[in-house]
Amino acid sequence: MDVSNLFNSNLDKIKISAIRRFDQEVSKIPGMLKLTLGEPDFNTPEHVEAAAVAAVRAHESHYTGMSGLLALREAASQFVAEKYDLQFDPESEILVTVGATEAISASLMSILVAGDKVLTPAPLYPGYEPLIQLAGAEMVEIDTTTNGFVLTPEMLEAALIANPETKAVILNYPSNPTGVTYNRSEIKALAEVIKRYPVFVISDEIYSELNYTDEKHVSIAEFAREQTIVLNGLSKSHAMTGYRIGFIFADAILTSQIIKTHQYFVTAATTVSQFAAIEALTNGKDDAAAMKKEYVVRRDYIISQMTPLGFEIAKPDGAFYIFAKIPADLEQNSFDFLIDFANEKQVAFIPGSAFGKYGEGYIRLSYAASMTVITEAMARLTAYVTEKREL
């Protein structure tokens, strides 16, 4: 009996991540240098690894509660209080998730129904739309390309008025792919708009510890707490991508509902990883500082090499990505441009088209790669562009 046509029809709207597909395709090319994925090249701090090993040796291999270890939630509560002036009760307002990815999934699946709309500044990380589509909802992109990738209160209000079916607004800052972040006055102004409408804010702040401005990271939860679901985690701040530890911070009324979805998705996050996370958020609360310093050096070097070639770059204030506009005299289809570059020079970036329709004409490269790889990649890019212009 053929059952292949019995799947959720919303799956027809979804494709495998364009980032992963492109990365896999170019990985087949011998000698490839990859500045594709948001994977820190740093090792997890040794004291965090030691905590994981200690947990294994202590036979900490059983389920935790659905919300995660209370000691971890207490550590997370203290961390965001100290770092971002946020107050969340560890017993009722924090959930430990399987990475920020599961935090996104649990949050969206808890609030969306068919017919809802979700507003997002664009271009943006492509991991949200498939989940929105699975719920039968629709993502509405707000074009920020003409404003340095910054969402203004006026843009947001216009989109909310034009889309009365809006259930949620997603913010991701510092941003993947642009590296743009928001200062206190900008976030406060966006929050003032949000508070005039009955909508959720899903604030993906996974790169909060990689903020290169003089002002510390500001969460919109500080200004619109009752409507905000804050997502965060340790993958970027502590180079713990494989540990899969994320967090949801929200008012108790919200977490009491989201935990239902979270429970049936995963039961609970990995126990050993949770013990490592306690160490990361306590004794390693400033572990990102050394990484951040190195990322700034890499960012500035890339900009110094690409700008003379004609690439337009909005200088990133956070995360570890460069989102560059392809010079007008070169191939404007970002996929074709990078496939040719990969074949000619064995260097891989990510096409801007992977980040939605407003990303076309751009390329994204991750400076979470080593300086050695970055230096060689820039030399090859310079040679490639020079040769193309000589044809």
Image (cartoon, rainbow, N blue to C red):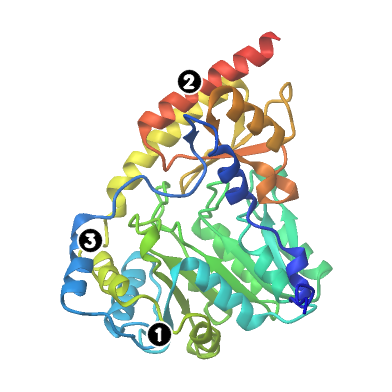
Residue marked by disc 1 = 67
Mark 2 / mark 3, whichever is N-terminal: 3
**Amino acid at circle 3:** Glu
Is the residue under label 1 in contact with that under label 3 (CB below 8 Å)? no
Q: How crowded is mark 3: few (under 14 residues within 10 Å), some or many (20 or more)?
A: some
Helix, strand or loop at disc 1?
A: loop
* Residue found farthest to the right: 162
Q: Is residue 256 something one can see in this rendering?
A: yes
- In x, y percent, where is residue 29? 54, 33
Q: Residues within 10 Å of mark 2 (few under 14, many from 20)?
A: few
Image vertical order of residue 84 relative to residue 121, above or below: below
- Residue drawn 69% across and 37% down? 335
**Amino acid at circle 2:** Ala
Image vertical order of residue 55 relative to residue 342, above or below: below
Residue marked by disc 3 = 49
Residue marked by disc 2 = 379
Mark 3 / mark 1, whichever is N-terminal: 3
Image vertical order of residue 255 relative to residue 22, above or below: below
- In x, y percent, where is residue 338? 64, 33
- In x, y percent, where is residue 296? 39, 39
Mark 2 / mark 1, whichever is N-terminal: 1
Image vertical order of residue 63 relative to residue 118, above or below: below
| 52 displayed left or right of 337 | left
Quadrant of the image occupied by residue 309: top right
Residue 314 numbered tag: none
Quadrant of the image occupied by residue 324: top right
| 372 displayed left or right of 159 | left
Q: How crowded is mark 1: few (under 14 residues within 10 Å), some or many (20 or more)?
A: many
**Amino acid at circle 1:** Ser
| 383 displayed left or right of 154 | left
* Residue found farthest to the front: 1
- Residue drawn 39% across and 69% down? 245
